[in-house]
Structures are given as C-alpha cells and as structure tokens.
Amino acid sequence: MIDIEKAILVPASVFKTPEEVLNSQELSRDQKIKILRSWEYDARQLEVAEEENMIGTQEDILDQIIFALRSLDEEYNLDQTSPTK
C-alpha cells in the first residue's frame, strides 16, 4: 500500500520514476497530479541548486514529470509554473 502523504511530500522516496506514478492502480487521478506537481517542484529546486553550483548534476527528470502531467490531461502551461528563484 502506498503512503500517500509521504509520496506527496517526497515522491522520489516512494516512486523510482514519474511513469510509476502514472501506472499506479492505487492512486486516483487527483493524487497522481498532486504527487507529480510535488515532484516537479522538487526537480525545479534541484535545477536552481545546480545552476548555483550547490550540488552536482543529476539526471534530468523534469521532462518525464511534464510528460506524465500532460498524459493525465492536466492543463499544464510552462509559463504558469511557480518560480523557484
């Protein structure tokens, strides 16, 4: 059973890829969107840290997250995402 609260707070601790979120039969569409949005925020924060040389480079997962959100028919607009700086 998936710990929904943990998955929303730290998605990468529960799922290996955004595709796993999409394929989960235990989650509702809304839960999947919340998890992916949280993961997106985390990925954007890591991008900022990488730009500022605060951490080493990591695999870019942001494209996978955006694809997953779009596949859930989430109205996703890159111009409306929250800034992280």
Image: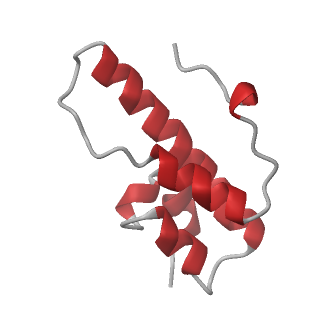
Identify the residue at image location x=49%, y=63%: 18
Q: Taking the image as drawn, is residue 3 in sight?
A: no
Q: Is residue 37 above or below residue 21?
A: above
Direction from residue 54 to residue 29 in the image, left or right = right
Question: Number of callouts in the render?
Answer: 0
Q: Outermost residue toward the left?
A: 56
Q: Taking the image as drawn, is residue 66 in sight?
A: yes
Direction from residue 27 to residue 9 in the image, left or right = left
Identify the residue at image location x=57%, y=67%: 4
> How is colour applied across the structure in the image?
secondary structure
Direction from residue 25 to residue 1 in the image, left or right = left
Where residue 33 appears, as percent x and y from the top left, is: 69, 58
Where residue 77 appears, as percent x and y from the top left, is: 75, 37
- Give whichever of 5, 48 is nearer the camera: 48
The picture quadrant where one finds residue 27 is bottom right
- Give whichever of 32, 64 is nearer the camera: 64
Where residue 1 appears, as percent x and y from the top left, is: 50, 85
Q: Is residue 71 above or below residue 42?
A: below
The picture quadrant where one finds residue 14 is bottom left
Where residue 75 appears, as percent x and y from the top left, is: 82, 49
- Give whichever of 38, 62 is nearer the camera: 62
Identify the residue at image location x=54%, y=70%: 21
Identify the residue at image location x=75%, y=70%: 29
The picture quadrant where one finds residue 15 is bottom left
Q: Is residue 69 above or below residue 45?
A: below
